[in-house]
Image: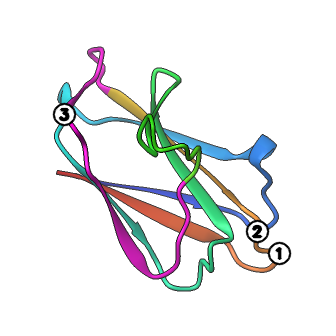
Amino acid sequence: MNYKIEAPANTDERNAVAASYDIGRPLIEGMIVHIPDGHKYLAKFQVLSKGKLILPEFGSGERWLSGNGQDVRANLASPITLDGPPYEITLRAYNEDDTYPHAFYLEIV
C-alpha cells in the first residue's frame, strides 16, 4: 500500500500538513519512505497512529525524517499493532523550501 502527502513551500513545523488513512489492517511489518530528489533536507516527515509517533521510530532520537533522493526503510524491531478498526495512520509534513512544494511517499510492506 502506498500513501502520499505534499507540503507546500514555506510551511513551518507549527503548521505541518496532515493526511489520515485507514490502512485496512492492524499490523505494520515494515515501512519505506520514498523521498524524491530535490528535497535537499528542507522538507520533514513523520507517521503517527492515534497521535503516537511511529516513524521516526521511538528511541531514534529523531522527531522528523528528511532526506534527498533516497528511500528510507524503517527497521522495525517488531511489528507495529494499530488500534482499530479503523486502522488509521496520519502522515505529517512541513517544508522549509521557500519556492517548491515537496511530497513524501509511504509504502507499507
Q: Amino acid at mark 2?
A: Ala
* Alpha carbons under labels 1 and 3: distance apart: 38 Å
Residue 74 lies within the magenta run: yes
Residue 51 vs 68, above or below: the answer is above
Q: How many numbered marks appear?
A: 3
Residue 45: image x %, image y %?
A: 55, 54
**First to last magenta residue range:** 65-87
Is there a contact, CB below 8 Å, between mark 1 and mark 2?
yes
| Badge 1 amino acid | Asp
Determine crowd level at label 2: few under 14, some 14-19, many 20+ residues with C-alpha closer than 10 A.
Answer: some
Give the residue number, with chain letter if any, for mark 1.
Answer: 98
Write down the residue under mark 2.
Answer: 9
Instruction: State the image coordinates of residue 24 (x, y, percent, origin top left).
Output: 21, 31
Using the image as rendered, state which of residue 90 and residue 69 is in the foreground: 69
- Could you say whether the residue bearing mark 1 is in a helix, strand or loop? loop
With 5 as the anchor, is 105 left or right in this view?
left
Residue identifier under label 3: 78
